[in-house]
Image (cartoon, coloured by chain):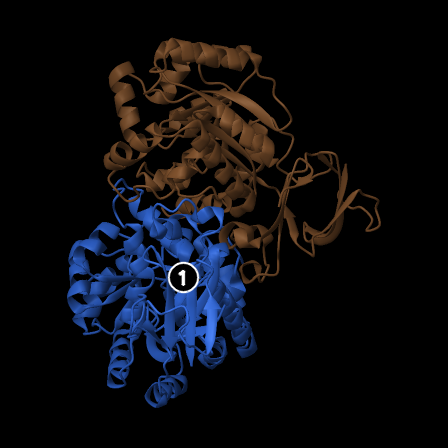
Chain colours: A brown, B blue
Amino acid sequence: MSLLIKNVLLDGRRCNILVRDERFVCLDAAESAEAEKVLDAGGAAILPAFYNTHTHAAMTLLRGYGDDNPLHVWLEEYVWPYEDKLTAADIRRGSELALKEMIATGTVFFSDMYFDIDETIAAVQESGIRAAIGITVMDYHPKALRDEKARKVREWRDTDRLQLTVAPHAIYTVGRETLISSARLARENGRKIHIHLSETAKEVQDCIAQTGMTPVRYLDSIGILGSDVIAAHCVHVDKEEWDILAGRGVTVSHCPCSNMKLGSGRFPYELAIASGVRVTLGTDGCSSNNNLDMREEMKIAALLAKVTGDTALLSAPQVLQWATRNGAEAFGYDAGVIAEGKLADAILVSMDGPKMQPCHNLISNWVYSADSSCIKHVICNGKILL
Amino acid sequence: MSLLIKNVLLDGRRCNILVRDERFVCLDAAESAEAEKVLDAGGAAILPAFYNTHTHAAMTLLRGYGDDNPLHVWLEEYVWPYEDKLTAADIRRGSELALKEMIATGTVFFSDMYFDIDETIAAVQESGIRAAIGITVMDYHPKALRDEKARKVREWRDTDRLQLTVAPHAIYTVGRETLISSARLARENGRKIHIHLSETAKEVQDCIAQTGMTPVRYLDSIGILGSDVIAAHCVHVDKEEWDILAGRGVTVSHCPCSNMKLGSGRFPYELAIASGVRVTLGTDGCSSNNNLDMREEMKIAALLAKVTGDTALLSAPQVLQWATRNGAEAFGYDAGVIAEGKLADAILVSMDGPKMQPCHNLISNWVYSADSSCIKHVICNGKILL
């Protein structure tokens, strides 16, 4: 299967881009190049599509449910009772709604952590986008369920669009032994490990009280941290811990909207960037955001970085890299940049609307000014999804 | 002129809304009601349109110009040299671009402060939206220009969509005598006063060094503060100053994106809300935002309020009121709510897209999840602009 994207703006010039099967094969093709399918971009800019590295897709069903309450009221009176009632069919519908929004907003990959994952997997397979679906591990799960999950981790075969991850939920829901056995199961089967980490000040205080260590040090002391770990949030992480995360090659999924909406705090951008750790972006679930829009997430990250006074901290190109290439690399996809040989994941952004004009700087416009109304097309794995 | 908006969602129920001339006359009209024009909303929700209380419309021309630099580099090497070259024709084009974006994103009013205001006024007159155009006063302006501006303030006649304001730029560009004479000129002619106030920590420190007082106390000591004052930013304002602002009836224009991008700091939501002061929302100019999208501004305000830990601070309905009704009231328009007898300013938001589904809470969806792609129509002063 081949696709010719005609009249597209790349690095400031008009060109024609040839895609064959799943990859960009030529960024400077002739207008007359042969292809089974031709897409006229009409002068739209091609940009890397988003990799959302931390979400709970089916929680789209809880969008706007119980907002603006104290945290414990929101959790105890809204989120948990609602989740208790969710059926497998609900998870399917919630995942489908999430996928519809992701595609409309330019996302071609998400890393998920939730329940009834077969439903989410089925929705992803139909959708055409990529995903890393986490098998959630919690200590309260009965042994039979844990055994079933372990069997799935061993038997599952990844495809070009779908991988399974092992997702021990967090240090406060998964004990030492289960953390260790989860990580072993993941590593024996070549799966990534997806975990919430140091999201709140309370998590850190409780961990110190129980283990004498902060969460990052605790996980490191039991051998969990490695280059196969994607740690979501990492809001309350000190300088030395950042060096530990960077040294172990951990990927951090920064979720600014969620950290703000849930009052978790400001991500320590200065420390994270100085440590050299790989940072990616995630929207978290819709109940704490309330959308899955990675463009908005980029802007909010870049602004939250600057609010304390350093207007040069976290530039537009850097946050775009967090939201695209860093996420692709973390999950092992040869994608995230528009380059020959790379997987053909991309969005086409119209330059016609007022939000993209004038164009002193395309990336600045995209990060700080645009919204999903600017997105004309979304391409994943060489196929046009929007 | 009459307009029937059919099949529209208002407060959770479907209805037909009749507009006559500039006002809503019936929120529960018959589907067969006579009207010169009929708009089928197709089940879209009707919500108040935005009042953007602080911007510099023509600066849309600087969108993305010199981003992510240290503040002084951005100002000295980018913004000021660029502004020096702007012609009246540029101001016209920049204003037109701004108006196009405002209408596309649901804004029907803006309070402006810039140069060559006749160009912006002409663009507003053509656009169909409302504006309060500030005549900028700075001490470096020659006397002839100041005299010309004063004459304009005296001779100008407001219309239903256009008013002139007097805009002494800030305490660091306008000295004591000019502040006093500007305020007198405004008050003798029934005009609002639009000023930047306590935007940065440096402004406060310099003011204390020069006057022995903080900016709010200084302005109060010379009689500037009153219910006709719209003060933009107010980031560095202490508890007692908030009580002064509230006591004098000052309106505050909060500009979260700008405060974050320029590293000015987090607006003290707790103090502002506790004081009872009227808070409104502004986008500031495009070079420090980089758009004029009030929906995004609402979300970022509501998140920035919560980041320090109080998840109930600045709810979605409250920030929507800041962005609509409070702005209308501050500038004397009988608008900002969808009610019989009120001026017919409104937007119609499609419920069909994924960002508005499910709908546990319409206002939450609008504030935290939507974007301009959800806006189907924009109505100002009874006329359909989009």
Q: Is residue B152 above or below residue B377?
A: below
Query: Left or right: where does residue A72 sit relative to residue A347?
Result: left
Q: Which residue is depicted at the point 51% across and 21% down?
A: A165
Q: Quadrant of residue B142?
A: bottom left
Depth check: B37 or B314 in front? Answer: B37
Q: Position of residue A254 (x, y in %)?
A: 44, 35
Q: Position of residue B199 (x, y in %)?
A: 32, 59
Identity of the amino acid at label 1?
Answer: Val
Q: Which residue is depicted at the point 38% across and 21% down?
A: A216
Looking at the rendered image, the quarter that the N terminus of chain A falls into is top right
Depth check: B212 or B376 in front? Answer: B376
Asked if residue A56 can be seen in this view, the reply is no
Q: Position of residue B344 (x, y in %)?
A: 36, 72
Disc 1 marks which residue? Answer: B8
Asked if residue B253 can be seen in this view, the reply is yes
Label 1, residues with CA under 10 Å away: few <14, some 14-19, many ≥20:
many
Q: Position of residue B304 (x, y in %)?
A: 33, 47
Q: Is residue A146 above or below residue B309?
A: above
Q: Chain of mark 1?
A: B
Q: Which residue is depicted at the point 48% across and 32% down?
A: A92
